[in-house]
Image (spheres, rainbow, N blue to C red):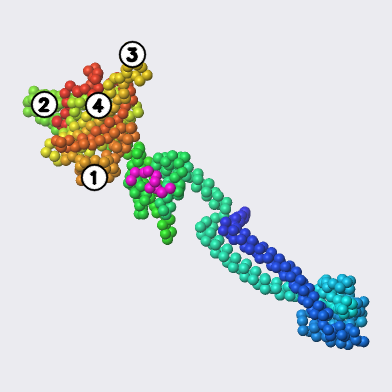
Amino acid sequence: MRLPLPRPRSLAGQLFAMQAVLIAVLVVGYAVFGFVSDRSQAEEAAGDQATAVALSVADSPSVREAIRSADPSAALQPYALAVVRDTDIDFVTIMNPRGIRWTHPDPDEIGLAFRGHTGPALEGRTFTETYTGTLGPSVRAVTPVRDGDRIIGLVSAGIRVEEISQRARGQLTALLVVASGALGLGAIGTYVINARLRRHTHGMNATELSHMHDYHQAALHAVREGLLMLDGQYRVALINDGGRVLLGVADEEDVVGRPVAELGLPAPLTGALLASEPRVDEVHLTEDRVLVVNTSPVSGGERRGTVVTLRDVTELQSLMGELDSERGFTRALRSQAHEAANRLHTVVSLIELGRAEEAMEFATAELELAQALTDQVVAAVGEPVLAALLLGKTAQANERGVELVVSDDSRLDDGLLPDSLPARDLVTILGNLIDNAVDAAQGGTRPRVTVTALTRQAPERPRRDEEPNREGAEPAREDAELVLSVRDTGPGVDPEHAETLFQRGFSTKPAGPGGRGLGLALVRQAVARHGGSLAVTSPDDGGAVFEVRLPLPAAPAARPGRGTAATAARSGHGTAADGAAPIGAGGGA
């Protein structure tokens, strides 16, 4: 059985051990230094004390008088013992110039030679030394006794080294007590700090933290969704690659540390990021994207920041728009099937009643009407995507009691639109404008929606690099533009709401011109994505007109038409068609 390897010590544990060892080394080092320093100071102090006592004894008149007597030891021995007793000196030795002792703590040593150096004292100088005598190693001072200019004796006072060591050990004991207290306080403080560190690091060691950082960075770069973290002051603390792309922040731009209000985001999106309450699956629009925003405050007793996730649903919204159109077509087909069944029953009933001629006339009239309506739409708008959209929206509008009409000015052949203008965006723009117009017109006295779709070309002018009057100069054209206009007979648009009309969720009333919420905002976004313009006006005769202008590259050669209408008579773009194409007057096709 393989035993599990011990888990490496956590980062907090490593720091605690390191700090404890450091404090212990400092305290022990200071204690050793203090002991050596105190011992040195104690020896120096002992030398000074011995010198002071020796000088005092040498300068005493009674000592000089006793030296001149017949028996110096008889008077000096009691005196020396008294000095030893009254001071912290271990011995006081008085001797003649030849070093023969007159006094000594051990009476048996009186009369014997002094153990130590006396040369400097015989020269008249006082000196100190450490020497091993009869009492063991000692720090002693030796000074001459003078009688005028003549040296009549020597005095040596000393303190044993053992006594000095005892004094140093006493100081060392006090130092160790203080050092132990400092070590204990340091250990407690270190433990408290590291316990807090363990909570913050969740007990992980340095290697685990390093691996977590690597995983964290890899995950941030790998996740396609946007991730944004804000601190407690709503400043950007972290943003991943996906967040930079979705918010339109350049890679070289350093946004970390900047307030989110300074990122130049749309006001509704900025408000959602600054909100203190969480946001769940909110849809917001930037200049070219539809984002789903989720925010979650990070709290731990106090607000620490906000985690924001961003998902790009631009393509999803476009697909939903196309799906809505398909659903509209399906509902229209279902309605058409119901109407066709009623007409078929009528034809069958007329035949059963023996009125075959009337049945033929009824069936032929219905077929001619349906084909005429289809031909009128395709003749005006040959672009198959827009034609199919208009046919489907016509049936939907008719079900809601609204007449949908293609204006006489409409002229958009198949093959005129470039590949840079995808059909999906056309469906988003025109489909939402028609839905908005039908909502506005519904319920009026004569509900009607008029759609205009055409291309316009700027007049010819000479090339800039050619002389204006030069014969044969090739004429140049300005870029063309696609114009889509939708007019309704509804209550119109308040001028005060003209700018906020296209913001997400704006509405003045449930079925008003701004009441579709996201639809008009998506229109504005699609128009801006192609560098176009979007305007809304309220004519004097009522209603509202939404006009979209999308720039097109140089007019391409028309591709062979994919529709049913001929294009031979369409030489001029922007000219009126041969008759209007009201496609909502009948039952629809």
Residue at (19%, 32%) from the top-left corner?
450
> What kind of residue is marked 1?
Ser
Who's the residue at 32% across and 18% down the image? 462
Q: Read off the residue under disc 1.
A: 507
Would residue 175 be seen by someone viewing this image from the given angle?
A: yes
Q: Classify mark 1: residues with Cα within 10 Å, few (<14), some (14-19) or many (20+).
A: some
Position of residue 438 measured from the top left corner of the image (x, y, whole percent):
19, 37
Q: Please say whether residue 326 is visible from this viewpoint.
A: no
Judged by its main secondary structure, the magenta piece is loop
User: Disc 4 and disc 2: Cα gap in Å?
Assistant: 36 Å
Residue under numbered circle 2: 362
Determine the CA span between mark 4 and mark 1: 30 Å
- Identify the mark nearer the N-term, 4 or 2: 2
Q: Quick one: label 1 or label 3, which is nearer the N terminus?
A: 3
CA gap, disc 2 and disc 3: 65 Å
User: Badge 3: how crowded within 10 Å, few (<14), some, or many (20+)?
Assistant: few
Q: Which residue is mark 4?
A: 454
Indicate whether residue 264 is drawn in magenta: yes
Q: Earlier in the sequence, mark 1 or mark 2?
A: 2
Write down the region rendered in magenta.
258-267
